[in-house]
Image: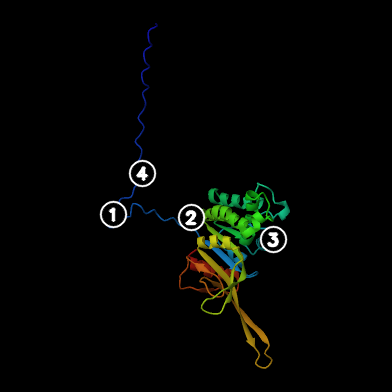
Amino acid sequence: MPPRPPRRPPTKQTAAPPAKPASKRTVSATDLFSDLVEETDVHGKFLMLCSEAGEGKTTLAGRFPAPLFITTAGEQGASIYEQTGKLQPGTRVIKLNALFPHSEIPNGSGHPGWDKCMETLNRFLTGKHDRKTVIIDSTSGLQDLCFQHGASMLYEGKMDDEEFTGYYRGYAKSAECYWSGVFLPMCLQIVAAGYNVILIAHSTLKDVTNPVGPDFEQYRPALMKSVWEYTKKDLHGIFYLGREVNVQIDAKTKKKKTMGDRRFVGFQPSTYYIAKSWVTDSETEELDAGSNEQETYKSLAKLLGI
């Protein structure tokens, strides 16, 4: 048997520098939780502007810092205002694909408009750019894209079948998987990174049952219940843009005559409209909006601390 070769001497290794200890907060004698509390980041604002058509939602949103619009099919306001100079110079507008006819929803590939929106939001969050505010115009339009995306991915593109429409199963499942599961978390990440996210919503009148008095009608965002329930919990503010019209009635003829109006932004809920705010003084219920969007934004920005 040949002699066993000598063992190879171990290779000398240079000792690695000791790792720096992770910064750790110490427990204070006066604060038992000081080592568990994380530093608070500077968050942006996650807001919804809601009103009837023509009350200035788009132009008001376009006054926020360095806006990027994501517009759904049929929403032409941002493009028109951009061309006519009513938006800030440098405003960017990204248009999403239109809805499919129900008979043409693809099986399994999703909706390209929904995918384009999510890709835009992801780039906004992770890429290098000069934008500070992303605006969805409109939320109801994006909701419809979400439903068709869900029909494609979860129901073989069959949006008219009982499996999708029965008990609103398909709508609820699409809202759960994609609106609550993808869209809202992305918005919250963008806001946590210090940017603003603004959802523009059309309003609609809803009957409200009042157990302690007469029933009434209330303006609410034109969204399906499942989408609305998910969204309202995450928003920092739901601001209603309204208008009070002063009417005078002639004592003799009983004819009504319009004597002017007052534009306002509502921050707290009332029997007239839905609203909420975590980012303004709780005592402020309404803001006088002035005569144009510049005056509205100036007052609103001061209230928001922008």
Q: Earlier in the sequence, mark 2 or mark 4?
A: 4
Q: How far is mark 1 from mark 4, CA to CA?
A: 18 Å
The residue identified by callout 2 is 192
* Amino acid type, label 1: Ser
The residue identified by callout 4 is 22
SS at circle 1: loop
The residue identified by callout 3 is 74
SS at circle 4: loop
**Res. 91 visible in picture:** no
- Picture coordinates of residue 1, whole percent (x, y): 39, 6
* Amino acid type, label 3: Gly
Q: Quadrant of residue 63?
A: bottom right
The residue identified by callout 1 is 28
* Amino acid type, label 4: Ala
Q: How busy is the neighbourhood of tag 1: few (under 14 within 10 Å), some, or many (20 plus)? A: few
For the residue pair 177 and 265, the one nearer the viewer reads as: 177
Q: Earlier in the sequence, mark 3 or mark 4?
A: 4
